[in-house]
Each structure stands twice: as structure tokens, then as C-alpha cells.
Amino acid sequence: MNTLLSIMLVLFLLPMHGTAKAPLHQHDVDLWNVVNPLNTTVTFLNTGAHPDDERSDLLAYLSRGLGIKTASLIANRGEGGQNEIGSELGDGLGIIRSNEMIEAAGVTGVKAYHLSQTTSDPIYDFGFSKSPEETLEKWGEDLTYERFIRFIREYQPDIVMPSFRNVANQHGHHRAATILSERAFEDAANPNIYPEHLEEGLSTWQMKKFYLPAASAETATTSIEIGDYDPIYDMSYPQIGEASRYLHKSQGMGRDVPVEPRQFHLELVGNVTDGEDEDLFSGIPYNFYDWAEIVPNQGLHNQLTKLQQKLDTIVDSYPNREVIFSDAHQALKDVKKVTKKVGKSELDPDLKHDLLHKLEIKEEQLNEVSLVASGLDVETTLNSPVLTQGEQTTATVKVENKGAFTVKHIDLAIAAPSTWEVDKDKHIKKILPGETITFEFNVIVPEEEKFYHPYEEPILQTNLSIKEKGEVSENALNFTDTVAVLPDVSLTTKPANVVINTADMQDFYTLSVEAKNYVNGTKEVDVSLDLPEGWQSEPVEHTIKLDNRFDTKEIEFSIIPPEDVKEGELDIHVKALSDGKKYDSTIQEITYDHINHEYFQYPTLVHVASFELLKPGNLKVGYIESGFDEVADYLINVGFDVTKLKETDLSSADLSEYDTIVTGIRANLARADLIANNERLKEYARNGGHVVFQYHKPGDNWDINETLPYSLELGMPSIEWRVTDETAPVTMTKPDHPLFNYPNKITDADWDGWVQERGLYFPMNWDDRYETFVSMADPNEDPFDGGILMAEYGEGTYLYTNLVFYRQIANQVSGGYRIFTNLISYGHETTTTASTVNDIQALVEKFARQDTFENKEIVQALQLHLTAVSHYEKEENTAKLVKHMNGFKELLDYQKEHGLISVDAYESLHLASDSLIANWEQ
């Protein structure tokens, strides 16, 4: 998406404000975006930790309002966050957020950069951190700081401002970014800090000023009014900032704001200029007039003055594209002359370096001015944006003159790595207004070309040069679609991982593999599994034929584990062979309307975790999915009877058929039908149902008094109400409660191995009718005891938990599965109590109807035994009844040991027997 498209998109979303506005159609937004920066030579850098950390309102004012060259340097990719538009997490989410950052920056006129260079980079968003020390330890402080200093020396900003202050109640990632930013104020200028940079050709760099967002207006050294309305954009600068924030869709950013005064307060904490503290730019050359005053060379003084005059003329000529186009080429010629003279001068080395850098920036800006003013629209497409190694394709370049004047002397080239074969440049002698000229370039991908990575620069671009007044402007333009060289075949497994329940071993586990063809033609492959010793698959291999590019075919394997599977973890790799080449990777395609199409490649494997998971028999679960987690699918994969409840189910279906109803994380945000039918959910509980409500943010349409049957207030500010240490000790305050004993006996070991965090958005206040069950805290903090809350409601129960079970279940953490199973099974244990032998007989008959026994003889043996016990029940002979019921339990043990009875039936009958014995022994 280009900048204008982004701005126009949000103009439809934002209300019109202000007075005396010129109609939008009178303004040439694209042209102003490139002309305005000619007013100044100042550069500004905003630093932060995650995509969305940029101070969008201030950056919009600086960039769109003043023309300042601005950038955002973000540490990581936001991989550890939450996803409000889909189910991608981890690296997939990081790819989404990185692209959202780029699109958002395009609206404010900011260039976005990241310290993180690849997927699963050491500088990774590992989740919320409460300390900068933990953050830098996990990122690698030296690695992070080296990249930071390198960037400062490359970008060479005049002014730097982190987005956040280093204060105790702030995110540890934010604090780390601020600490490094402030430290770099001196270190980036110190040649003894990372001297290898200098050996590589970089120079030291001294920022001129370092600011922090002021703690208050009273502590500010500089305050800027940024709330002004800009008639060019028909928005105020905060509105432009919010328009950019709407593009952080995976984080639910963006809000409507009116045109009104807004002060941005800054605190100056580092300054090497003689300027006044109250003025953001004082002491910093603002344009080439100021640079002319600094240089002692009179000739250079005059040339710099004339250059800025020429740049001012271009700005003053807005919106006359024809005049601006011609003048931009003359200014380009002037910039190159001045650059040559500065290079040969005997200026102070630091002054010379700084001035050459500013002239280089102005040359880049004038190239952009030429392109936009020309009115040329260049669209480059491939036969397919997906390519494979060795493929020959055609790039079609369509050049349309949308301007009002003829453009001459245009050269076009496809820029590709030197190992690619590409047709020679094409030349357009002239193109008239309204005319379209199309060229085709033959392109051949090398046989050994590396595969696409979402964080690398585009591998193909279109180079466009225009000659006017004897001077050539040059611009590199991206293709219309993301160009990606991918493996011939992608293999995707369903499920992505497998849990083997050692308490309920299946004879085989079904694994689906989807093969997708990226070759422009037919592909025949043999797909098989690399299995650990003792494991088998049926069949051993599938041979499939994919006729066309993007064709898919799904095949199934039955994975047969050995009988003696032990608790633990292992990987099953999936591979395909074709024409002697091996393919063993998955291509995750990430497609959303607001970002570029992306591809993420990772090894195709199924992670297998084996552990004991006891499940109650015949538990029926209704799951209200939010789209933010995949817990329902994981539960289905381990054998739970789960129905995903749709809008019609919530509004009119008989909910009483479910033993438990579970809401997905933040379901109130995604499911308006849940809010609309919330009273039906309460009625379900009043009539004896069990509801498990998973965590929400305070802003997720959460009503303190109405969402749950009794009041529950989520902690604010939410940054303070979380346990981020995944190893934080957990105390089960009611260890004998059924929640921790049915169907799984929960121990301290079940809290081991958790990932990322314990819980988010802990409640801060709740009704006294809720019981509490766990207590936990981050190091050196007071404990929270609201991680699991449950209250009786009518004949049923409501349970609220803010613990991050969805992350544990997705990562196959056995304790996460076992504890969550207990939470959703609460109340079901009452169905396995028995007051009479007839109750147990009824259970046997129920399980027999469900085919949970190996054969009829097993059922008959159990029924015969219970018939004998019933005689002692009639005689009220407690001793004999207890003795024979223990014999009945031994019979159950024998049947389970020999695989003659299902685990569900075994557990239910065992519990019912214990219940009957306990009644008679009282």
C-alpha cells in the first residue's frame, strides 16, 4: 500500500473537523509529501521496543507538518503479543506487526526500522517484562547495543527521543530501549565503542539533542503545539497519527479524535549545541541557509544559500507539477555541484561529514520529487509473484502518464541480483499525457537462488530514471505484489503437533499433510515421514501429483506408536522427494488486506508430547471461539467432545446439552453475539451448567457488573496486574478442592515448564461470593490470588481465569492441559457418584451403548458381578458389599490393564464404586 492509499483509507473512517477547510480534491497530497521535506535538513529519530511504540501524533507533526526527515527504530517485531485479527502467534504475528509498522509509518511519513534482523532473532519479543535487566539479558545486551550504535552511525539523527521513560511501572522492553538510547548519546560519538564499525567505513556520530517525553508539563523543557489542523490532509496531526495507528490492526489500535489543541511535552537531557532549551531545533542547522552561516568558505556559503533558495522556489511552486518537475532536476544538478565542492574543500572533517550527509539526503528527496511531479505511474507485475528456483518468467512494466505534460527520456530496468538473468534496459523517448506504454522483461531465477525471507529487502525492483535539463533522477520502485522465491513444494501438517495421552493410548494417530505446488507446471512427489525408532506409519509413503501452480492435495498417515511410549517429547519430520530433490518445509501464507502478502518458511515437523491426561467420561463442552486462540481444536485433538458454538447456538439452541461452556480468550471483543446472549449464558449456569470464562482486557467490552453473574473488576493499569515470570512459584490455596483433584491430581509439577508468562490482566476487585484457588507473584512483588475465581450461581457455577492456558496448550505444556481439563470438568465428577448398585449398573449400560468395551463378554462379566453385589445390598450386609465392590474394582483394573475398557468408562466406574463403598462405610 502506498502513502496516499493509506491516508485516503482512513479519511473515510475519521470525521471531518475544523473550519475554513479547502476541499480535499484541491490538494495534491502525494506531491506535498515529497515537496515539504525540502524546507529543512533536520533529522529526527524516535526509538521504541515494539511495533506501535512510535509516538504517532508527534511524528505526524514533524514529518507531515514540518517536513522533518523522521524515523522509528523499533527493537523487536512484537512476536510475543496478542493477535486481534487472526490466530497467528510467534514469528507469524511478528511478520504481521512488522508490515503493519511499515504501513503505519507510510501514513505519517516516517521510515520504520528494526533492530531484529530475522525470525526468531535474539532480539525477540518474549512477552511482557518488568525489568530492563531481564530484557537485555534475554536479548543479549552487547548484541542489541552494537546494532543500536551501528544504526545511529548509519542514520545520523540530529535529535533522538525514546517513546517512553525509564520508570518502574513501564514495560521492561520499553525501558531497555530508553536506556540504550540515552547511553548512545555519548557512545555513538566515541571511536572506542565498537571500533570495528569504523574499520567497515562507518563514522562516529554525535546526536545534537536527546529528549525524553516529559513526565509532566511542569517538568518539560520544551512544549510543542501539535494539534493544528492541516488543510493539505484535511486532518489535524493527531488525526493523521491515529489514521496510522488504525493500521496496527493486529493490536486493535486507532481511535477517533477531534481537532483540538494538543501539547507535546519534552524534557531535554542531552545537548551538545548552544541552542536554547525551550526550542526543539535551536542550535541545529534547520536548512541550508543555516549551514551557509556555519561554513567559513564564502563560495560554499553562496552556493548553499542559492541551493536553499532553489528548494524554497520548488516548495512555493506547489501544486504546479510541471514547474516543480523542471526545477527539481535543476536543483539535483545544483546539489551534486555543491557536494563536489564540499568534498574537495578543507572544511573541518566533522563539519564536512555532516554537510555531505545532509546533501545526500536532499539528493534522495529531489529524486522523489521528480518522480511524483512527473505524473508517471509505474506498475510492475510478474506472471506470478511466486517463483521457484530455475524458473523463467516475464515482468510486465506498465508506465502511464497521469500528468498534464509530456515526459521525455525515460529509462526502465529490472534491478535484480547479479546472478539473475534479466533483459536489458528499455527506453521511452517520450510519453504524452494520458498515454500508457508497456514493456516486457524476461527474467530467469538462478537454480540455487536462496528462498524468500520476509525481513529482507525486495529481491526485484524497477529502476526508473528520467532525464530533464541534462540531469537524471533515479528511483527504485517496488513491484505491485510481494515477489517470493519459494521451494517447489510446501508441506503443511494438521494438526501441527500431537499429544499422546499415556492414560488413553490410541492404536494410531491420524496426521494430515497438505502438499502445495509452487512450480509453474506439474509436480509429482513422494511424501513420507521420518519416524523415531519403533514408530510406524500407514502407509509408509504417498505418491501424489499436483498439476498446476498453487494446486494442493491433502493426504493422511496413520501414525502407530510403540506400545511402551514413555512420557516425553519428540519430533516427526515430514519430507517430500521429487526428481532427486528433498522438500521439508512449510510455507505459511499470511494474507490481510492492510499489509503485503507475506510468506514464512519453517521446517515441516510434528512435535509429539506424551503425558498422562485423565479426562472425564462423556463430558460435552461448548466452546465460544474468539478467533484469538485455537484451544477448541487442541481439545478435540486429544479426544474431548467439543462443539464450537455459533451465533444461532447462543441465541436459540438448547445449551443444557453441554456440561461446560467455555469462552475463548477475549471473546467479548470478537463476539457481539456473546454479549447479546450473555443472559442466556447466565441462565444456562443457573440451571446447573458450568461456565469457564477465559481472560479479557478491561477494554474488551467488559462490564464489571454485568459480564459475569457477580461483579469482577479487571486490574488497571493492566501493566501492573500480571505475572510475567513463567517460573513464578504457584501456591494452590485449596489443594484438596475437586478443581485440583478431578480428573487429574494436580501437583506442583503441573506448574513447571510453562511458557512466556503465568497470567495477564489479573482481577483487582471481585464479589465475595467468588472463591480463590491460587496465589502467585513475580519476584519481589505482592502475590495475586485472583488467577482462578469460581462462584456458585443457581444450580451451576461460573469460573473466571486469567491464566494463559491458551499459550500452554498451544505449546503442549502437560500441566496446562491437565489443569485446564480440571477447570472445564468441574461438576462432572458428581455424575460418577453412586448411592446404589443400580446406579453403577446404569453406568455400565450407558457405556455399553457407547461401545466403550472391547466385547459383550466384558459387559456381561461386570453385570454379573454387580448382580451378586445387589443381593448383599438388599441384605444390608456392609462387609460383604464392600468386599465384593472391591472385587469389582479389581475386575475393572484387569480390564484396563488388558485394554478391554476405555479410560473414560474405567474412571467413571471406579469413582462410582468408591462413592458407593464410602456411603456404606459411613
Image (tube, helix red, strand yellow):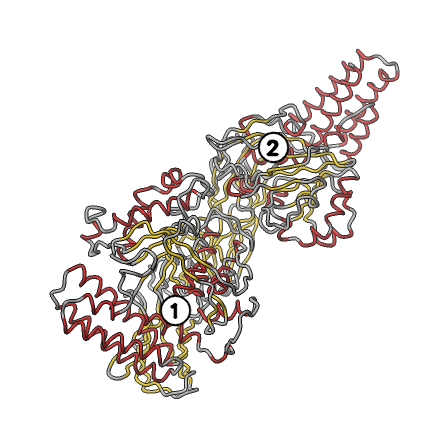
Look at the picture and state if 745 lies above or below 592: above
| Amino acid beneath label 1 | Asn
Q: Residue furthest left?
A: 346
Q: Residue furthest front?
A: 218
The quarter in which the C terminus is drawn is top right
Q: Nearer the viewer, residue 364 or 592?
A: 364
Residue at 44% x, 71% y is 383
x and y percentages locating residue 860 in the rendered image: 79, 27
x and y percentages locating residue 814 in the rendered image: 55, 34
Q: Residue furthest right?
A: 874
Left or right of 234? Residue 133 is left
Name the residue that disc number 2 marks. 613
Residue 584 at least partly seen: no
x and y percentages locating residue 413 in the rendered image: 32, 75
| Amino acid beneath label 2 | Leu
| Mark 1 secondary-structure assignment | strand
Q: Quadrant of residue 916?
A: top right
Q: Which of pointers 1 and 2 indicates the residue nearer the eye? A: 1
Q: Residues within 10 Å of mark 1 (few under 14, many from 20)?
A: some
Residue 408 at least partly seen: yes
Left or right of 774? Residue 840 is right
Q: Mark 1 near mark 2, Cβ–Cβ under 8 Å? A: no
Residue at 38% x, 79% y is 318
x and y percentages locating residue 585 in the rendered image: 44, 51
Name the residue that disc number 1 marks. 478
